[in-house]
Amino acid sequence: MDVKVFQFNGCKKCFNETLLLKEDAKYKVEFVSDPKNWKGEKGDISVITGYLLPSDLDHLELIKNNSNKVIAYGDCPATGGVFALANQKGHDVTPLANLIEGSNRVHGCLGEIEELKFAISGINVPKLKSLCQVCSRKATCDYLEEINRQIELEDSETCFNDLGFLCSGFIATECKEKCIDYNTPCRGCKPSIDRSGIRMLAMFGTLAGNIEIATEHSVKGATDKLGDDDDDLTDSLPDVVGNFFRFTLLTSGLPKGRIPSSGTLLEDVFIGRLIEEIPLITGLLGGAKSISLTLKFIESYEDANQIEVSEQTKKYRNELLELEKELQKAIDKEDSANYREITDKIRFIAGNMNLSNIFFSGFKSIIDVNDDFNEYKTHVFDVVEGTYKNGSIEYTINPDGIITEIKINEKLL
Amino acid sequence: MSDCEIPDEYIQERIQNIVVFMCNECGQGSANTAGVARMSYDAAIRIIRVQCTGQVGPIQIMEALNNGADAVACVGCCLGACHFFNGNVISMHRIKLMKKLFKELGYSDQFVNQYTSRAAEGETAVGDFEDIIDRLTTAIQEKGTIKDGC
Amino acid sequence: MAVKEDKMEESKIESEDSEEPRIGVFVCHCGHNIAGTVDVAKVADYARTLPNVIKAEHYMFMCSKPGVQMVKDSIRELGVNRTVVASCSKNQHGLTFAKAIAEEGINKHRHQQVNVREYCSWVHKKDETKATAKALRLVEAGVNRARKLQDVETRRISTTKAALVIGGGIAGLRSANDLAELGIPVFLVEKNSTIGGHMTQLNKTFPTLECPQCSISPLTNGVANHPLIELYTNAQIKSVEGSLGNFEVEIEINPRYVKDNCTSCGECSLHCPVEVPSEWDKGMSMRNAIYKAYPQAIPATFVRDKKACIECNTCINICPVQAIDFSMQPETKTVKVGSIIVAVGYSEYDPTEIEPYHYGQEGYDDVITQLKLERMLSPTSLTNSEVLRPSDGKLPKSIVMIQCVGSRNDQVGNQYCTGVCCKFAIKNARIVKEMYPDTDVTICYIDIRTPGLNFEELYKSAQEVGVRFIRGRPSEIIKDPISGKLKVIVEDTLSMTPLQLRADLVVLSAAMVPPEGIGPLGSKLKVLRSKEGFLKEFHIKMNPTLSSKGGIFLAGAIQGPKDISETVAHAGSAAALAAAPLVKGYIEREMLVPTIDYDLCVNCGICKTICSPAAIDIDENGRPTVNKIACRSCGMCMPSCPMKAIQLINFTDDQLYDEIIAVSGGGAVCE
């Protein structure tokens, strides 16, 4: 079967992952990393990876006209993905379905290669369980007393939501990149229902029903109304967009963002996000360079705030950096066997290709059963206002831990 | 948007449909009382009857806004007097999150609101309706309508 | 163990989805009320163009006989199966048309009432164009809604003619008695060994200074001897299953170790070697390990305190009727009832958490609560009704009462005003002052709250006999290190003078707080609690006796602090409401309930959390299930469900969506 993979904009994580198609001899895979100069020749299946802009329409139409089936692989072409967070600031990331008709979708950030194979063959993916149903944590789903932001790693038995860390596992299907296994609440990259973000928002509104909110007395008619002031609820949720709409901002039926842009599309993705969410977002964005990108963010913060990092942590981080280099080599050589081997090694340390296990001051869960986990365990995380710089990256966080300014050298990606 | 004075007609043109979800108890009651007393309010107010404001979710609110409503409001029973225990409070929490979401997207947070009313006092409903329009007017003057975003 | 509910077989609602909707639209003129503002002909013409509309008419008075006949005829002649009447509010004539279509064999829930009078013509009199435009939208919305309306079945559920009353205080007794008088068998469960509750501990009741024992004894005797009332003392609720009309309750009954043939002669107690402080007497006297709480206690049967007993067997040997049996075992009894009344009363606030008052601390024995003072003053007290200092047994020369202990305080205790303390403090102050004219009696208050008939008079009478009132909340009770005398530090806020009041006895007017153990009981009953910890009523004004769950009622102080008269009235109301469905024999419920799509459901349980009448429960497979009888059709579960798995019939997302589109104006914002 003849498969062409097109990489449009953004990180190349999903594009790289399609290397694994080569393991199966029945696929004849061709990689097109520069679709803008692609001349167009008839083919069977076209796989689109990377986020899309309206300016890509011509190229997409050319692809569509030359193929029997178009598949959006990964969240970026399917729902806009994490890059679509830039639309909050007026950018124009667009899902494939809005540009051309009749495309198929494989959700997930990173999309799962097995599901892509199903899509290529035109078979429906067998019904998967919900993430909650495969989660080992016990849930009561009772009203929350408070919302927590920093992640403490002590309790690995209670549901994240019961602990006050918001998790979108309810609307997600079970996945390979299971963040929940690495003490990281799910953000719903693989939604099982349309408009998942807004549904989570509604559900969370219920869960937060016991938290004090501001009301005011409306003088006309003298009744109560919902107040405009900030209150416990809004204070504890500084980033609603980043929390509930991280992957589905475009497909949730929300109006387009009007916040003034303050940089490139990539920089706008980061602005407004919370510091503790940064490692995961860089893990999502960086493609084959996500490890070095993530560590640049983390290490600059750690250095500036004199956060001690154990030898064990350093060792694992260096190992990851080495693996990253090897991974790039494997990609360049289009060596799928080597690619799988190296990604498995990365997953062993970083949890998954989204690097859920990497965090400030250490790792979130035990890597090797022979380790003393206390050696590299992440501890409670403090927000320190300031500007942090590490070579090509410079970012500023405010006292609430929200990124207000950022400069990234895009050549890094 | 805010650079120049916006004429009133411009704003009035933009306040055509305000969807108000009213609960079956105090909400409906107060609007009926207002009608019986022949009070007067803007014809842009369109009432949808629901069992309890707790039945209205962000999905419904966004559906209304996406289908042409200029603003959405829920009107429920007074705080502490919900006929279904705490539906009005739960609804307020959901709407509070929506307001936050609108702010984060660069819009005014006045496109969604929640009010209370009292069944026996029609003026509470009318006061709420007037307040919706006042706030919407101010919001449009400051940041434009929700439709200007597209 | 599931409660059997008759006629509850899962009969699928007859789906007529395959049947094409045939909608009849009728626009009412209401004389000039609607037609004077709204162009009704235009509305009817517009309605005729809408999909599925078979007939659209306008008529002078739709609610008149010919108008209703028009609706009926359309069903008979044109096969209309859904009707939309654009006229007045649903409350006014919605039922008229619903009944009419039901008479023609169409489910009444297929009628959609559109209110173009109260919501349109009456409020937009000045602008006929806009009013007509709005009426068009409202009618379109109504038609859209009608298109997908489904049949809703009305079920008749027979009720179990029996009631459970939890708590044998004045509220519980009143409710039990009233229910039994209506011919309803009652199970009365009391956790202590005797019934009567706090009222039996009091010396006198305000404002008439009556003897509470005399007031309550006809009720206690009446309840104990009523043929329809089964009394369980030393008993607790173990589990509650079922819902409105049919509950199944497990009661755990601890043994008295004394059989019913006890003649109450008292020989056993007289010879018992063990002595422990009496709970009923607030520790003011001692009782034996085998005892009767107080002489007039009902049931009169003695009871053995197993924990205190040293098993010397003296009582067994001495009992003339061999009534004592140590081998009695706790038993569990299951009863089936139709209604439950919770009348578990209150606890007196424990002032130990107010550090400056030193209540309960060593050396501060002379700081007591009003309930202890009541016990001291009572005719059966150890002190022979004299007020004596607990520390040395001497007559106090000065008594200071402190109001609002645990009430009206944002820092410690509670925010609410108990509302009863002013009255009982004034009552006790007057009684004490009248007994000992030479003793100084002072009340330190924030505000005196004595509303209602006869209470202002009580206040005045206390002032007249010489009770001193000082406005100010005492900051501290101190002990003079040399004399060992107590002093109350207070600022008289009326004259702005700081005072140190010498006090031989300090009496704290402690608040009424939710009773101990209400948490577990509340969760067994699945009723919600207010933030203060009392059980929350259904509606504070209109239904203060119904709890958050149908079929469970609240009587007395468990709903909030009350005095005896209020409690009795509240309990009577609870009894009447609890009796209604049982006397009638059945409940009719419209099955306007949510259904759960288990293919979508992820078993998160949020619907259970939000369901205030606890109609959603998690079954043994972890799946939520809806109790159709308990459901109140509020629809709050719908938006809570992240998976859109739970949908309230006739209010589903799809149905609301159709209505929203028409009302919003129809134009999409973001293409």
Image (tube, rainbow, N blue to C red):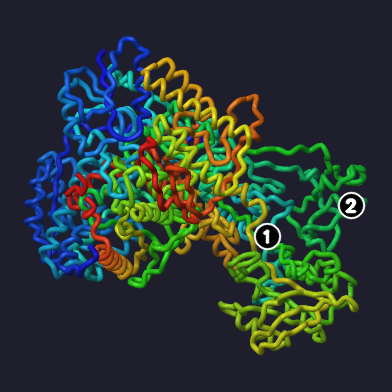
Q: Residue at x 19, y 35 (%)?
A: A57
First along the sequence among labels 2 and 1: 2
Where is residue C382, by image quadrant? bottom right
Compared across the picture, whether A12 is left or right of C331 comes to left
Q: Secondary structure at mark 1?
A: strand
Q: Residue at x 74, y 82 (%)?
A: C442
Residue occupied by mark 2: C267
Q: Residue at x 63, y 68 (%)?
A: C407
The quadrant of the image that shows the C terminus of chain C is top left
Compared across the picture, whether A119 is left or right of C169 comes to left
Looking at the rendered structure, the kind of residue marked 1 is Ser
Q: Residue at x 47, y 55 (%)?
A: A398
The quadrant of the image that shows the N terminus of chain C is top right
Mark 2 Cα shell of 10 Å, populated few (<14), some (14-19), many (≥20): few
Q: Nearer the viewer, residue C38 or A201?
A: A201
Q: Nearer the viewer, residue C500 or A108?
A: A108
Chain of the residue under the numbered disc 1 shown in the image: C
Of badges 2 and 1, the one in the foreground is 1
Chain of the residue under the numbered disc 2 shown in the image: C
Label 2 in the same subunit as label 1: yes
Furthest-front residue in this view: A391
- Looking at the image, is C3 positioned above or below residue C555? above
Q: Visible in this render: residue C185?
A: no
Looking at the rendered structure, the kind of residue marked 2 is Glu
- Looking at the image, is A214 positioned above or below residue C490? above
Q: Secondary structure at mark 2?
A: helix
Residue occupied by mark 1: C347
- Looking at the image, is C465 positioned above or below residue C161? below
Where residue A240 appears, x then y in whole percent? 40, 49
